[in-house]
Amino acid sequence: MIGPGRSVTAPAGPQSSGSETRASLKETQPFIYSNYSMAGMSAPITPAGTMALLNAELLAGLTLSQLAREGTPIILGSLPAFFDMKEMTNFYDPHSLLLNLACAEMMAHYLAG
């Protein structure tokens, strides 16, 4: 619980949603679902593959929240980054920014539709 009436969860994906996620869905507070993927490690190395995975996870989170309680207000977000297997570090570059913009555009598309 963060502040009055706000619930936050940041699973690695919809398959890792736990009891805290289910508990917040039972209440009448907005549900924040945010995923984090690293291209080349927890997501495909290509930008298109990473975008497809991020989008699928966000839509799965949206679907699960609505199945748990229809009409649940939800805020979706994602944080894509790239992972360098040689250096074993994650990093942000212009491609990361493009993935962030693509994620925002996809959510705007679903909101408008």
Image: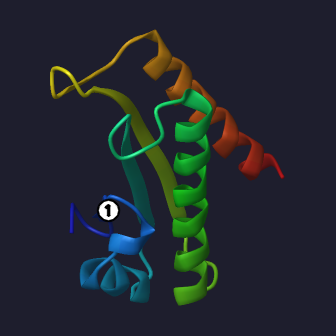
Residue 69 makes an appearance in the image? no
Which residue is the site of mark 1?
11
User: Which quadrant, please, contains the N terminus?
Assistant: bottom left
Residue 35 drawn at (x, y percent): 40, 51
Q: In this view, does 78 lie to the left or right of 41?
A: right
> Residue 66: percent from the left, percent from the top?
60, 79
Q: Which element carries disc 1, helix, strand or loop? A: loop
Specify how the rendered protein is coloured: rainbow
- Farthest residue to the front: give it: 86
- Residue 113 vertical placement versus 86 (above, below): below
Image location (x, y in percent) of residue 101: 57, 25
| 14, above or below 54, in the image | below
Residue 96 falls in image quadrant: top left
Query: In which quadrant of the rendered view does residue 38 lie?
Result: top left
Residue 81 in sight here: yes
The answer to whether residue 68 is left or right of residue 85 is: right
Residue at point 73%, 50% (across, down) = 111
The vertical placement of 64 against 59, above or below, is below
Q: Identify which residue is drawn at 59% across, 35% down.
A: 104
- Residue type marked 1: Pro
